[in-house]
Amino acid sequence: MTSARMLVLSLVASACLASPMLAGAPRARDLGVPFEGRPGRHDAITDVVGVEVGHTTLIRGEGPLKIGEGPVRTGVTAIFPLGKTETAGVAAGYFVLNGTGELTGAVQLDEHGLLYGPLAITNTLSVGTVGQAMVAWSLEHVKDELDLYQRTIPTVAETWDGPLNDIYGFHVKPEHVVAALDGASGGPVAEGNVGGGTGMVVYGLKGGIGTASRVVAEESGGWIVGVLVQANHGTLEQLTVAGVPVGRELLAERSRRSALSPALRASRPRGEGSGSIIIVVATDAPLAPTHLKRIARRAALGLARTGSTAHNGSGDIILAFSTRNRFRPSGSALTTWEVVPDEQFDPLFDATVQATEEAVINALVAARTMTGADGVTVEALPHDRLRELLRRHGRLIE
Amino acid sequence: MTSARMLVLSLVASACLASPMLAGAPRARDLGVPFEGRPGRHDAITDVVGVEVGHTTLIRGEGPLKIGEGPVRTGVTAIFPLGKTETAGVAAGYFVLNGTGELTGAVQLDEHGLLYGPLAITNTLSVGTVGQAMVAWSLEHVKDELDLYQRTIPTVAETWDGPLNDIYGFHVKPEHVVAALDGASGGPVAEGNVGGGTGMVVYGLKGGIGTASRVVAEESGGWIVGVLVQANHGTLEQLTVAGVPVGRELLAERSRRSALSPALRASRPRGEGSGSIIIVVATDAPLAPTHLKRIARRAALGLARTGSTAHNGSGDIILAFSTRNRFRPSGSALTTWEVVPDEQFDPLFDATVQATEEAVINALVAARTMTGADGVTVEALPHDRLRELLRRHGRLIE
Amino acid sequence: MTSARMLVLSLVASACLASPMLAGAPRARDLGVPFEGRPGRHDAITDVVGVEVGHTTLIRGEGPLKIGEGPVRTGVTAIFPLGKTETAGVAAGYFVLNGTGELTGAVQLDEHGLLYGPLAITNTLSVGTVGQAMVAWSLEHVKDELDLYQRTIPTVAETWDGPLNDIYGFHVKPEHVVAALDGASGGPVAEGNVGGGTGMVVYGLKGGIGTASRVVAEESGGWIVGVLVQANHGTLEQLTVAGVPVGRELLAERSRRSALSPALRASRPRGEGSGSIIIVVATDAPLAPTHLKRIARRAALGLARTGSTAHNGSGDIILAFSTRNRFRPSGSALTTWEVVPDEQFDPLFDATVQATEEAVINALVAARTMTGADGVTVEALPHDRLRELLRRHGRLIE
Amino acid sequence: MTSARMLVLSLVASACLASPMLAGAPRARDLGVPFEGRPGRHDAITDVVGVEVGHTTLIRGEGPLKIGEGPVRTGVTAIFPLGKTETAGVAAGYFVLNGTGELTGAVQLDEHGLLYGPLAITNTLSVGTVGQAMVAWSLEHVKDELDLYQRTIPTVAETWDGPLNDIYGFHVKPEHVVAALDGASGGPVAEGNVGGGTGMVVYGLKGGIGTASRVVAEESGGWIVGVLVQANHGTLEQLTVAGVPVGRELLAERSRRSALSPALRASRPRGEGSGSIIIVVATDAPLAPTHLKRIARRAALGLARTGSTAHNGSGDIILAFSTRNRFRPSGSALTTWEVVPDEQFDPLFDATVQATEEAVINALVAARTMTGADGVTVEALPHDRLRELLRRHGRLIE
């Protein structure tokens, strides 16, 4: 138990101080995966100025699943659209590609088209705890009564980490949420087995958090679009990287060696492919709520490029926000919004599709093989095999 | 036939030159019906500066229904948000309370939240003709190619005038649409048996076009909300005026004298109450598309005050637009919208509910008894009985 | 503190054993308020066979508000569509009249059109706690893994009881949720200051839980429609009972005596009228998810009859479900639904409007004057004044 | 003019009697393009029993554009879900990926989830004419009054064929609609420059009508999913075939030779990529309206595989229907639906994605180079280049 506790501490630290990305671990484009468009400085959602991300990663215990004891492979990821101290809201919109999942606050988001305060992503069975902790955190950090009131309906999304994590043990506690919120920062974002993505499985391989960004051409406004995903969806045979059917190729090799882990298959309550993906799109392009719904729909097209068909058991939910216009109850009779006109949207649409595609592949590339509940092991995408398959299809950038 | 033709000519003229409203015919508040809120100058949708309304009224022929020959009791009503010559679009949103009806252009309205050019209301079976004529009219009147392109998906709504009109005779022709468009103007708006409302039946009585407006208090912005309805819905027993169950009282009296017209009951393909109501809400309050959907939903609450339960066969569709921000493809990278902040919306919501309630009652009060197809006669709401019932319930303003 | 604790215990008991309804306290129709339609046996949502309701009522402490200490005026209400032991899902749909509120599980409800397990209504800041406790409760009570999985996204709605309750004290605890779930039963339903409605304010008067039902004519299927509301919305001047402007009349009297409680007005973060209403509609009519959205929209029309214009700060959310078809992951390739055809919906629509109207008025009639945080007192609707006003408008049933 | 008229006659004939498909013209899989899943007998939407398709193709005139005179490159495609003589409705649902387009009847489709009678696809400026002609056709062919009434709001979708066709000449006439309706049949479906797709441009190349189908595995129900597209969207650089960036490769070659047709680029009012795609999905799997919206969303993922990012000026609208349950106003109090349970949907989702992808590529492969208005020539996708590019990327099936 002591060593387990050490493990979690060291991993929380890694999330904040020494992410794979920081430590020089390769990302998808480092491996030669070709992507369209021009990424921002960190190729991360935090390239949108103001956006801050914090992870709490919980990895603890081994051996057979005992509900309440572990093993624990879970966490929480927090995102602030405008940083930890800004209390204004931002314009937002969402799209549900497949709604077997949760996004608390969705009703209010849809009504006003505004997102106040942080949003968090965690495992399915921690949504209530995380939301409650977010309200408590706001009570402590937001002094103005009206600003506080805007935060009383928290925004929490989730995916199911049952195969690897003792999800019915409810291991995410309020202090973990506070840590993710307090630890949020700009700059590089840890990917893979971190935060809410810790125990996630994507396309039959180890998944988790991924991020990417795009910079729109200067003559189209020079806007930045950043994406962060918590990827936990799909089956191996669907996996497509840069148009190459990597999953089917891996499956063909694998079936020559041994059958795909039956434990994993069995451990999904709704069957293989029953996971989910949460996609968060941030942009500094000034957009109205109506427009952010449009942006959100494009992320589905980026997801499709990686092979997803949005299976029935999947909660494929996309939330988009724009950091430019800021909203706060003011008593003024009239406000002014800056807005990119519709006929200038194509570069933003392209950027959203491209950044989403890359963020999903980044999650796969960053994730590491993990053994969790009941001895289930989920393997990481083998980087060398990926490169070889891309090369064979004339798609590797060497 | 000659006299029938004369009839239509004289009535078209009455729509443009000598509406009941202009001619001193009483409106609901003239009869002492109490309404909340303060109306605008004309108590009409045209109180919103820029809004223009035009009717073409077709009344021709008598006797038994011969498909293609008549009798004709129909028409078309055109509304320009910004007047006939302005080609810019306005922010718009709609709400479908019950969707057994048509609103062409709905898909595009929802995507961009913009309404370009005129909208028209007619009978169900003339929607195609009216839309096609609107495109042709734009081709003639809009010179800029991009402005013209914005108008190529026309906005047409409808209700069913089958009981009184030879609806399968397709009597609305392109020239009637052109006349309504060309004849549109600001100022007082003809109500009752005019334009698209000519042959309509509301709450079992003669219905048609009605309008009303509200002025929001100066300290709340002083905005104007105008409503125009084409009312063709409901059953007599539902009719409620100022909270008084007028319909049930009339029904009680009527059943003591004679049965309700079986012809009328039979003539609705989906049964009594299968009509519809189109509600158009205009405002000069600067609102974003998201907000106009919210406004549109409030019109349903105003409709409810008149007794409607939105029956299954009814197309109860509400379209709201704001004239303040103007939209035109410009090539600029950034535009500015003025927007009333959400926390200032309550007076606009109240105004929408109130103006909708009054517009429906105005349609009833203005309509005149009409005999149409197969000898069906639909009686007007008897003004004296209305006043007596209001008095008996302590609701008449004397 | 001891007496306070006794108070809460006695009130919890009253919710289960001796509701106002059971104790002979009058309901709206007992006072002579006229309503349309025929109510079911208990005039309650539980007239729909299988529906069970449980309340936990928390009333404790007095004096000035100290966050964390009280006074406590809150609770939770649980509703099981099919009773506590049935694990199947039911068809469901919702409508958001105004979305300044929360309905967790909304995304999944919309995707599948199914509601699994209980739903709960509480105060805004207890949504996370209540949801988390519901998942834990299911973990204990639902044995089948797939059935359990269906319940992992709980359905929780809320309204804000800030003016009377120490809402930032987070006084609803998991054990209170368990008590409401365990205590759920059929039969008469306690109304007024009970359960989630304990501290609620409606139309400026004391509100809370209300319920009603309607039985559709035998020739229209004989179906039952039951409604339960947690009413916390509107301003006094809006209140309309049976078409009579009761609120304005009371306000006129009140302003002759003394100003309306400024404390109450000040205590709403978004201003007067910023409350909300949650409406739950149950029916045994076999309906598909699409149809239940249609039913939900009609409840808004019933709400409108009581005067609401759905203010900006109000979370006016309606959830409808049908108990007839039962859903459970079965592995079968094909299932069969019984469905009332659309053209038979009008009686169901009428029933929904009527039962919603009565449920709101029942909440008002059952609620008792309450003093809460910061000495704010919210008065109950005075029954004698109500009767007098109805009589004066020829609407009292004597 | 005489020869022009002969041209149109011969092409109408070719649509009915001698489609490219029938004539042995290769389809995408004939060229060795790899697709997932198993196609039905004709690899066409008509593999769903009952579905009938009819095209009227209008090709007439040459030389510079004279509005009203031509050249004419347009048409109309009609689809009957249950064949020409069946009057019952089917369950249906739609999804708007990008709504810069039209789908008449959308409001009613959404309300009832039912599609009555045929649907048609044409050019943007013929929607009214086509709808009006469909109502007239129904008046002639549907005898039962209620059945006829169900058809009075026609379902018409469109894409813009401006670059090649004299679209403002309104060349689609009622008789052309009647011909498409009367000529509808099962069996092989003509693709490419036919029907509504005659003048369409997809990914910068000649597009039009395409179709494909998938058969779900017997153990998953053995259902058939058929797709028909009218493809008119995207830019050349987006075009992706079987994951291979064919468009960018062609563009690279082309830019080495000569610039991309500036005429084409200029001729789109909203710029390159401003076209649209209409996707119709048919299935014999028994599904409820809610489910068909889910199916419709999957078609967007299939479209994404071909490279689309759903540009701002594009009307990307997907309509899905199920032929199994049949709806007709009957007066019965209760009906029965057969429904595939949600947990069996994945094979249907996969099939929809796969058939949509193939239908788009089939449209490209079948289309032929066309010269239209103002001498604009749009080239067909060169089959040999396609094969070479697939081979180079290890994706050609030889």
Image (spheres, coloured by chain):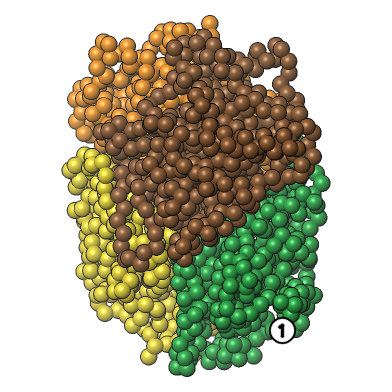
Chain colours: A yellow, B brown, C orange, D green
Q: Which residue is mark 1?
A: D25
Residue pictured at 53% horizontal, 6% vertical: C398
Vertical arrangement, residue B207 with respect to residue A118, above or below: above
In the image, residue B350 lies at what x, y percent? 39, 32
Would residue B232 be found to the left or right of residue D264 on screen? right
Residue A272 picture quarter? bottom right
Report the residue at 40% width, 79% height from top.
A35
In this view of the protein, can residue D267 be seen by the observer?
A: yes
Image side of residue C278 versus residue B365, left or right: left
Quadrant where the image shows the N terminus of chain D: bottom right
Q: In terms of depth relative to the viewer, which is nearer, B280 or C282?
A: B280
User: Where, quadrant-wise, is the C terminus of chain D in this rendering?
Assistant: bottom right
Residue at the far bottom in the pictured view: D257
Residue at 75% across, 77% down: D2
Left or right? Give the position of A185 relative to C290. left
Out of D5 and B269, give the one closest to the viewer.
D5
Residue C361: x percent and y percent?
46, 21
The disc labelled 1 sits on which kind of residue? Ala
- Image location (x, y in percent) of residue D269: 48, 69
Q: Is residue B168 above or below residue C245?
A: below
Label 1 environment density (alpha carbons within 10 Å; few <14, some 14–19, many ≥20): few
Regarding mark 1 in the picture, which secondary structure is present there? Answer: loop
- Closer to the camera in the image, A123 or B282: B282
Rendering quarter of residue A3: bottom left
Q: Residue at x 21, y 55 (%)?
A: A84
Q: Nearer the viewer, residue B161 or B63?
A: B63
Name which quarter of the figure residue A64 lies in: bottom left
Provide the chain ID for the residue under circle 1. D
Q: Where is residue A361 drawn, in percent x and y?
A: 41, 74
Note whether residue C361 is visible. no
